[in-house]
Structures are given as C-alpha cells and as structure tokens.
Amino acid sequence: MDLEGTPALHGCRMPAEWEPHSQTWMGWPERPDNWRDNAEHAQRVFAKVASAISKFEYVTVCASASQWANARSQLPQNVRVIEMSMNDSWFRDTGPTFVVRDSNACLGNNEWKVAAVDWNFNSWGGIEDGCYNDWSLDLLVARKILEIERIPRFPHSVILEGGSIHVDGEGTCLTTEECLLNKNRNPHLTKEQIEDQLKAYLGVKKIIWLPRGLYGDDDTNGHIDNMCCFVKPGVVLLSWTEDESDSQYERSVEAFSVLYNATDAKGRKLEIIKLHVPGPLYMTEEEAAGVVQDGEAKPRLPGTRLAASYVNFYIANKAIITPQFGDQKWDDEAVRVLSLAFPAHEVVRIEGAREIVLGGGNIHCITQQQPALL
C-alpha cells in the first residue's frame, strides 16, 4: 500500500538503530565483477554475519533464483531464505528505510504502526560515476520487501542510500556533504532543500553535516556509516587516526571540529568517542585478479586503499556485530572501545570482514533493520 504525504505528516520518525528490531534483512552476494572468485569468500562471511545476528533476532536473507539453494545450504536453519532478484547485495542502500509511528493521534490510517521510505537509487552515482551499469532490479528491492511484510510504503523520487544517513531517534540526523551534495545524486536540489526532504521523510529536526566521509570511500562518495554514527543520543563514534601522514587524518580532524561545535536536536553538546581505523589496508594482486573486470561494474584494481572502518558495525538486539580485518592491534582496540560504548550489548567479532570491504562496504552496508512493533 502506497501512502500519500510524507512520514512526518503521519507523525512518523526513523527510529535509532539500537531501538528493538523485529528482524534484519540481508541480500546474498554473487556478482563476479564485484566479489572475487564468484563471491565464494564473500558468501562465507555474509553467512557468518547472518548467523551471528540470528542469535539475537530474526534474519531474512534474499537470494536470486540461481543462488537460493547455495544460500540455504550455507545459512543456519533459523535464518529465513527467500528468492529475490537484485543487482547486488547492499541492502542498507537498496532496502527500505523503516519509520515508526509512536502515537495514534495523527493523520491518516491509524491501523499501521510501521511504514517505510522507498528512496530512489542510481548505483551510487549513475552511469558516469556509479558502481555498475544496470540497477533496475535494485530499484525494486525495497518495494518487494514491503510487499512481503505488508508494510505501507512512502515512495520517493529523491536519490538517497541508507548508508548516507544515521539518526539518534530523537530528531537528529548525521550525514556528509561529500555524498548528499554530490552532483551525481540530486543536482537539482540545494542543501536546504535536501535538509527539508530529510526532515519530512525521517521525522528529524536537525541535520549535522560532516564535510567528508572516510578516505578511500569512493564507491559511495563518503557514506556516513563508514565515518561516524550515534551510540546513543548525545554520543557519537568517529573514525579516527593519530597518524598525521595518513590521508584519513585530515578528514578525522575536520569531522571532530564540526562535531565538537555541534549540538543535537535537543540542544545537547556531543560526546565524541574516537574509534581508530585499521591498516591502512590495500587490495592485493591476488584479490583483484579474482574479480571479473567486464566493464559492467567499477574496476577493482590492485593497490587500491580499502575503505575499512570499525564504525561500519551493526547494532542488533543486544549485540554489536563488528568487522575484524586481521589487524590484531586495531581489531582488539575496536572491540574494547565498542564494549565500553555499548555496555549492555555483546560485542560479536566477524573475522574475515576484509572480504566485504573488498566489495566496497562492510557489515552495516549489508544489513537493514526492521523495527519491532511495541
């Protein structure tokens, strides 16, 4: 069912990721021109992620017809596997952005409590700058999920990916100018007009704009979910490095300055927790050689700096599902910092998450939470 008006007019807001979920949605990777060795390694790590989350909440994994049996065989029985066509498996960006209605005293049909925004999508930049040439199947992913769950839909023409926004559930949204103001997304909209759309469709009151995302995150043009996220209202985690020779240093310092001088929608100054990046890490000759370079997708070249960040974790019900990159010093430090930031959650390490970052993202990018009805 398509709804008229905007979520804000219906009294809706996008809940924070730490609010209760009814389930997590994921896709199943298979593109040989993005995932090395026919996605064999990536599939094993996706299965690890789904299995880890399934210990804390329901998980649904969507796989193409040709991959359904393979996905079913690799995933535990408590994970639901359904058939769905897609161009690639980044459900944070192609899946729906769920919103909730906390009160019945609003406009419209009072029978529903959860709805979702179905944003427009152009493969992170269109034909010129995007990650692959055909995204026609991805355009239908959100709608299919909402049809399956019988959840009302707010269709929207604005091009926006879920990884480009992060909310505190109390009226504040984090994003980056590098992404949302990029000419390859919505060149006809001004910054103020984009703010108006975020307020109308996420139910937020204030947007905090970081200038840039993580260094090397060229695939998404600097998504916020690699750079900064809320831990709870008034507290953020920021990708950080102390190495002044690292190209990430300038970006981290720049973002820190913005956050330090910012207040949220409730007028609170932000507490900033620094979360050190790994590496730097680079794509190897072997890894690049395993990707089919067919001209249909963005080339994966040896020596490319990987957009690896521990901020790209997922908050499940009572668990933090965090990437591990094989860099023991910073892997362990990330677990320490996240354990202190989320004392009521179990921090679950996903070894081998490098396989996801080789494809252009990480755990947060491949997951999409569906809020629970309270």
Image: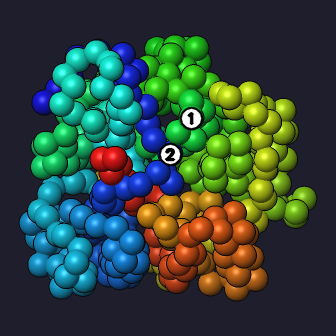
Write down the quadrant of residue 46 in the picture: bottom left
Could one spot residue 48 in this view of the protein? yes
What's the mark number on residue 16? 2
Query: Looking at the image, do the residues carrying marks 2 and 1 touch, with CB atoms under 8 Å apart?
Result: yes
Q: Residues within 10 Å of mark 1 (few under 14, many from 20)?
A: many
Q: Judge whether residue 305 can be spotted in this image.
A: no
Q: In front here: 222 or 71?
A: 71
Task: Provide residue 26's location: percent of width, then percent of height.
Answer: 31, 61
- Residue at the image point whose x is 69% and y is 63% from the top: 341
Residue 317: x and y in percent read: 44, 64
Please provide percent x and percent y for residue 45.
40, 78
Q: Residue at x 31, y 56 (%)?
A: 22
In the image, what residue occupies the spot 45% across and 57% down? 365
Pick the residue in front: 2 or 30.
Answer: 2
Under mark 1, the amino acid is: Glu
Amino acid type at mark 2:
Ala
**Circle nearer the N terminus (2, 1):** 2
- Residue 325 as seen in the image, left or right of residue 67: right
> How many dots with numbers?
2
Give how far across and how far down residue 47 sits, in percent.
Answer: 33, 78
Disc 2 secondary structure class? loop
Disc 1 is placed on an element classified as loop
Quarter of the image that includes the N terminus:
top left
- Look at mark 1 in the image and give the residue it sits on: 170
Label at residue 359: none
